[in-house]
């Protein structure tokens, strides 16, 4: 993967997280639209690209690992409070409390999201993850500040989150090229876990980013744009 794509992943999450110092209040309608677009785009490339690629090796157990990934994301959300979806649940304390469960689960989530980038041409996935991490990082910054973490600590943990997706790519690349033992033989199963996570994240975004689970016109347009761009890029590669 070209280095500029790593920079896109890093700076998109950094921008999303650090923008918490610029935007105040709880009305983040534009971020919700970005979240809807990225969720639809992520769902589209998962169905059109990642799932076919994972089954390309004729491994009958890939579906099992997709289910494992789907369920694993449910477990992660018990600790992250749904920040992966851009949720900003504020837990106000009288003293500084570091949300360690949120931080660990969110970093692990981002690390796993970066892993499919090592397999083939994944330009669309780079952009999908980058867009998805903007509201997620913003939500993380909000939670950190709400829990009375200082500005320097908040910046540090936002940047730590920002390097997780690139780290997942480099680790996965080492697996796929055989630089770490013989784990490259299980690469499609690892991708199955990531696909399950993507399916859970993208579908949850689509159905939870609006009140009463209803699609208004702006959200509908954002979703159609996300799916449409994923489909156009897929057809362009045929």
Image (spheres, grey):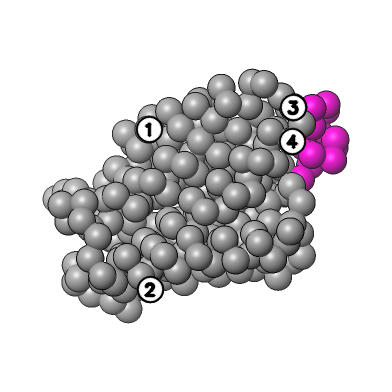
Q: Are marks 1 and 3 in contact (CB under 8 Å)?
A: no
Picture coordinates of residue 126, whole percent (x, y): 61, 60
Query: Of tags 1 and 3, which is closer to the observer?
Result: 3
Q: Are marks 3 and 4 in contact (CB under 8 Å)?
A: yes
> Can residue 130 be seen in the rendering of this structure?
no
Q: Earlier in the sequence, mark 1 or mark 3?
A: 3
Determine the residue positioned at 64% across, 37% down: 191
Determine the residue positioned at 19% across, 48% down: 91
228 to 53, vertically: above or below: below
Q: Residues within 10 Å of mark 1 (few under 14, many from 20)?
A: some
Residue 154 falls in image quadrant: bottom left
> Can residue 139 be seen in the rendering of this structure?
yes
Q: Which residues are magenta?
A: 173-185
Between residue 168 and residue 62, name the one nearer to us: 62
Residue 18 falls in image quadrant: bottom left
Query: Of tags 4 and 2, which is closer to the observer?
Result: 4
Look at mark 1 in the image and give the residue it sits on.
Answer: 74
Q: Quadrant of the N terminus?
A: bottom right
Determine the residue positioned at 26% across, 70% down: 217
What is the CA distance from the residue labelled 3 to the residue labelled 4? 6 Å
- Disc 1 element: helix
Look at mark 2 in the image and give the residue it sits on.
Answer: 19
Return the mark for residue 56. Answer: 4
What is the CA distance from the residue labelled 3 to the residue labelled 2? 44 Å
What is the CA distance from the residue labelled 1 to the residue labelled 3? 27 Å
Q: Residues within 10 Å of mark 3 (few under 14, many from 20)?
A: few
């Amino acid at each position: 993967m070209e280095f500029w794509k790593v920079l896109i992943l890093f700076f998109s999450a950094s921008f999303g997280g650090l923008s918490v110092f610029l935007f105040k209040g709880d009305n983040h309608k534009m971020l919700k639209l970005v979240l809807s677009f990225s969720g639809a785009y992520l769902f589209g490339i998962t169905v059109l690209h990642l799932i076919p690629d994972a089954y390309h090796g004729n491994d009958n157990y890939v579906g099992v690992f997709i289910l494992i990934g789907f369920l694993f994301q449910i477990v992660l959300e018990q600790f992250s409070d749904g920040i992966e979806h851009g949720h900003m649940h504020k837990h106000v304390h009288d003293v500084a409390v570091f949300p360690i469960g949120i931080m660990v689960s969110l970093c692990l989530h981002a690390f796993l999201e970066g892993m499919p980038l090592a397999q083939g041409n994944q330009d669309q996935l780079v952009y999908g993850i980058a867009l998805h991490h903007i509201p997620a990082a913003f939500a993380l910054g909000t939670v950190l500040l709400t829990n009375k973490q200082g500005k320097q600590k908040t910046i540090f943990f936002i940047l730590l989150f920002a390097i997780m997706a690139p780290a997942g790519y480099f680790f996965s690349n080492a697996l796929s090229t055989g630089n770490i033992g013989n784990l490259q033989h299980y690469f499609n199963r690892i991708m199955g876990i990531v696909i399950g996570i993507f399916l859970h994240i993208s579908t949850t975004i689509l159905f939870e980013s609006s009140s009463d689970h209803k699609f208004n016109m702006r959200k509908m347009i954002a979703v159609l744009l996300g799916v449409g761009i994923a489909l156009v890029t897929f057809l362009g590669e045929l």
